[in-house]
Amino acid sequence: MSSSMWYIMQSIQSKYSLSERLIRTIAAIRSFPHDNVEDLIRGGADVNCTHGTLKPLHCACMVSDADCVELLLEKGAEFLSYLHIYHQHSLGVAC
Protein backbone atom coordinates (compact mmCIF):
# COMPACT_ATOMS: atom_id res chain seq x y z
CA MET A 1 0.00 0.00 0.00
CA SER A 2 1.37 3.37 -0.95
CA SER A 3 2.02 5.96 1.73
CA SER A 4 -0.68 8.25 0.38
CA MET A 5 -3.26 5.44 0.50
CA TRP A 6 -2.15 4.61 4.05
CA TYR A 7 -2.63 8.27 5.05
CA ILE A 8 -6.13 8.34 3.51
CA MET A 9 -7.13 5.15 5.33
CA GLN A 10 -5.76 6.43 8.65
CA SER A 11 -7.63 9.70 8.19
CA ILE A 12 -10.90 7.87 7.51
CA GLN A 13 -10.39 5.57 10.49
CA SER A 14 -9.90 8.48 12.85
CA LYS A 15 -12.95 10.42 11.59
CA TYR A 16 -15.61 7.70 11.53
CA SER A 17 -16.80 5.04 13.96
CA LEU A 18 -16.68 1.38 12.94
CA SER A 19 -20.40 1.40 12.23
CA GLU A 20 -20.13 4.49 10.00
CA ARG A 21 -17.19 2.93 8.18
CA LEU A 22 -19.27 -0.23 7.65
CA ILE A 23 -21.97 1.70 5.78
CA ARG A 24 -19.42 3.67 3.76
CA THR A 25 -17.58 0.48 2.80
CA ILE A 26 -20.77 -1.27 1.71
CA ALA A 27 -21.86 1.77 -0.30
CA ALA A 28 -18.52 1.62 -2.15
CA ILE A 29 -18.37 -2.19 -2.22
CA ARG A 30 -17.05 -2.32 -5.77
CA SER A 31 -13.99 -0.41 -4.59
CA PHE A 32 -13.29 -2.52 -1.49
CA PRO A 33 -12.95 -6.27 -1.00
CA HIS A 34 -15.65 -8.04 1.05
CA ASP A 35 -13.00 -8.82 3.66
CA ASN A 36 -13.20 -5.20 4.79
CA VAL A 37 -16.90 -5.59 5.62
CA GLU A 38 -16.20 -8.78 7.56
CA ASP A 39 -13.28 -7.16 9.38
CA LEU A 40 -15.41 -4.17 10.41
CA ILE A 41 -18.16 -6.43 11.74
CA ARG A 42 -15.63 -8.61 13.54
CA GLY A 43 -14.14 -5.43 15.00
CA GLY A 44 -17.46 -4.46 16.53
CA ALA A 45 -19.35 -2.48 13.87
CA ASP A 46 -23.09 -2.52 14.53
CA VAL A 47 -24.90 -4.19 11.62
CA ASN A 48 -28.10 -2.36 12.62
CA CYS A 49 -26.68 1.13 13.04
CA THR A 50 -28.36 4.00 11.25
CA HIS A 51 -26.20 6.49 9.41
CA GLY A 52 -28.36 9.33 8.22
CA THR A 53 -31.38 7.45 6.93
CA LEU A 54 -29.59 4.24 5.93
CA LYS A 55 -28.63 0.99 7.59
CA PRO A 56 -25.94 -1.37 6.28
CA LEU A 57 -28.51 -3.84 4.94
CA HIS A 58 -30.26 -1.09 2.97
CA CYS A 59 -26.94 -0.10 1.40
CA ALA A 60 -26.10 -3.68 0.49
CA CYS A 61 -29.54 -4.08 -1.14
CA MET A 62 -29.16 -0.80 -3.02
CA VAL A 63 -25.84 -1.86 -4.55
CA SER A 64 -27.25 -5.35 -5.29
CA ASP A 65 -24.54 -7.20 -3.40
CA ALA A 66 -26.06 -10.57 -2.49
CA ASP A 67 -22.94 -11.77 -0.65
CA CYS A 68 -22.92 -8.69 1.55
CA VAL A 69 -26.67 -9.01 2.21
CA GLU A 70 -26.17 -12.64 3.24
CA LEU A 71 -23.26 -11.73 5.52
CA LEU A 72 -25.24 -8.95 7.22
CA LEU A 73 -28.25 -11.22 7.76
CA GLU A 74 -25.99 -13.93 9.21
CA LYS A 75 -24.58 -11.34 11.61
CA GLY A 76 -28.03 -10.27 12.81
CA ALA A 77 -29.10 -7.41 10.53
CA GLU A 78 -32.79 -6.64 10.93
CA PHE A 79 -34.33 -7.26 7.52
CA LEU A 80 -37.67 -5.65 8.35
CA SER A 81 -36.14 -2.36 9.45
CA TYR A 82 -37.90 0.55 7.78
CA LEU A 83 -36.11 2.93 5.43
CA HIS A 84 -37.88 6.24 5.96
CA ILE A 85 -36.64 8.06 2.89
CA TYR A 86 -38.09 5.45 0.51
CA HIS A 87 -40.91 4.23 2.77
CA GLN A 88 -39.67 0.66 2.31
CA HIS A 89 -38.12 -2.18 4.25
CA SER A 90 -34.71 -3.52 3.24
CA LEU A 91 -36.24 -6.24 1.11
CA GLY A 92 -38.36 -3.69 -0.72
CA VAL A 93 -35.24 -1.73 -1.60
CA ALA A 94 -33.73 -4.89 -3.08
CA CYS A 95 -36.62 -5.43 -5.51
Image: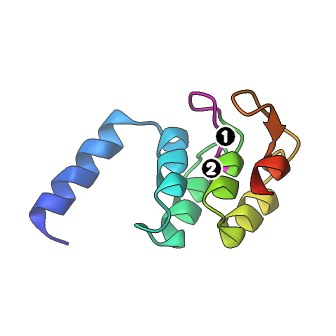
Which corner quadrant of the image does residue 81 belong to? top right
Residue beneath the point at 60% across and 59% down = 63
Q: Are marks 2 and 1 in contact (CB under 8 Å)?
A: yes
Which corner quadrant of the image does residue 78 belong to? top right
Q: Residues within 10 Å of mark 2 (few under 14, many from 20)?
A: many
Nearest the viewer among 21 and 60 is 60
Q: Residues within 10 Å of mark 1 (few under 14, many from 20)?
A: many
Of the residues shown, which amino acid type is indicated by label 1?
Answer: Lys
Q: Which mark is residue 42?
A: none
Would you name the residue on which mark 1 appears? Answer: 55
Residue 80 on image: x %, y %: 88, 42
Residue 69 on image: x %, y %: 73, 62
Residue beneath the point at 50% across and 63% down = 29
Q: Identify whether 15 is placed above or below 39.
A: above
Q: Which mark is residue 59?
A: 2
In the picture, which quadrant includes the N terminus?
Answer: bottom left
Q: Main secondary structure of the magenta part?
A: loop
Of the residues shown, which amino acid type is indicated by label 2?
Answer: Cys
Q: CA distance from mark 2 to mark 1?
A: 7 Å
In the image: residue 80, left or right of residue 32: right
Which range is magenta?
50-56
In the structure shown, which secondary structural element does the residue marked by tag 2 occupy?
Answer: helix
Q: Is residue 19 magenta?
A: no
Residue 13 on image: x %, y %: 34, 45
